[in-house]
Image: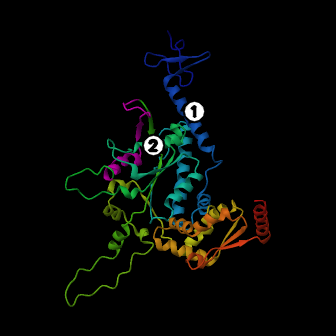
Amino acid sequence: MTEEQQSKCSFCGNLQSSETPLIVGLEGQICETCVRLANQVVASWGRKREITKPLKKPPIPIEIKAHLDKYVIGQEKAKETLSVAVYNHYKRLAAESEAEAIGMDGESVEIDKSNILLLGPSGTGKTLLASTLARIVGVPFVIADATTLTQAGYVGEDVESILHRLLDAAEGSIGLAEWGIVYIDEIDKLARSAESAHGVRDVSGEGVQQALLKLVEGTSVRLKDKGRHKDGEGNVLDTRNILFIAGGAFSGLEKVVDKRLQPEMTGIGFHTQLPDQQETPGDDVFHETHPDDLKHFGLIPEFIGRFPVIAALEQLDIEALVKILTEPSNALVRQYSQLFKYDNVELEFTPEALLAIAEQALSRGTGARALRGVLELLLQKTMFDLPSNDHVVRCVVDEAAVLGEGQIKQITDDAKEQDIERQNSEQQLQA
């Protein structure tokens, strides 16, 4: 049989042989290599359609930050960092999609991801930033809790459970899950514990950090099918393009940073120069955080190196707390006003009352989370009595009510109150 008579692949032209079998169609043939290449191209089309379906175009950083501004007050540096990271993530997805669509293999520059570590005191908005970000992005987004993770083989969830949740968020699409974003909360709880006298392994601290190393950097993970205890085929998920954002309060880290910035004087004697009275660590001490400080806190160097971008959140002051009460789209004042509207009652706060509420919340030391606790305690009695008082149309909260020196003013509708009294008298006469 001559070369002209021998069957060839209609796409690449390879001749049929025992090593290169052909799939014969009605008007052509195709080899295994071209089938695999076509599968990759079609998969990239599908992923590109999925990634562009939620959003018509990738949002630019200023648009992402503007959306975050609607829900998060302050924290400008952290919001800018997250906005740039998400935008770069979109650009990487677009570049890889284009490369796969045209069949490029190693001809373009491969862009590595930059994972982010968020530092900040409790109640400054780390989790709120992540949950708000989930509304913006058009890729699968998962919020995981580091406190529930343990080293593989021990009681609890292993790090692969994060990828299972990401795959669920992608509705089972491996290609879309490989472009997702994962936020790991309470990452500071994985700090390495002190060496135990009994040599017990730190399976929920350093062990989890070790397990997360390859996952965060980028590797292929075989996910076992749910409900199967034996090793099976499962799905293979590549984490190279998954953006990881970790956040934690890192309580006590400010002391480590302050100790490095202001070393103690150890001299003794009559002629020793006494140090000036040291100030307490400022609100922006987290901005001075160095990777070596995180190492002293308890994170292993390999884990720190996989989060090159460190963004610090600032402690909230009274002015910021007042803005949190009133300005965001889901501000607490708007939430409680809506609750009162369900009973046809208007709720009003005086500026002095808002300031007093912010001062009480600041004294609790839990950041913005304390605001809801203060409001619940303040409005509890009114919310208990209000449903039984149909004649109340407006409630006014002033500074005296917040400080416990007075009551919340309840304004009634005289005409409505007279109708209620008349109805009650008529019922008594009938009885």
| Of 343 and 248, the residue lying toward us | 343
Residue occupying image coordinates x 32% and y 56%: 300
Earlier along the polypeptide chain: callout 1 or callout 2? 1
Residue occupying image coordinates x 49% and y 60%: 126
- How packed mark 1 is, by other alpha carbons closer than 10 Å (few <14, some 14-19, many 20 or more), is some
- How packed mark 2 is, by other alpha carbons closer than 10 Å (few <14, some 14-19, many 20 or more), is many
Task: Say above or below: 238 vs 332.
Answer: above
- Position of residue 310 measured from the top left corner of the image (x, y, whole percent): 44, 61
Which residue lies under the disc numbered 1? 42
- Position of residue 383 measured from the top left corner of the image (x, y, whole percent): 62, 64
Task: Say above or below: 385 vs 203.
Answer: below
| Of 352 and 11, the residue lying toward us | 352
Mark 1 residue type: Val
Residue range in magenta is 205-232
Residue 43 appears in the picture as rendered: yes
Residue 239 appears in the picture as rendered: no
Which residue lies under the disc numbered 2? 163
Helix, strand or loop for disc 2: helix
Helix, strand or loop for disc 1: helix
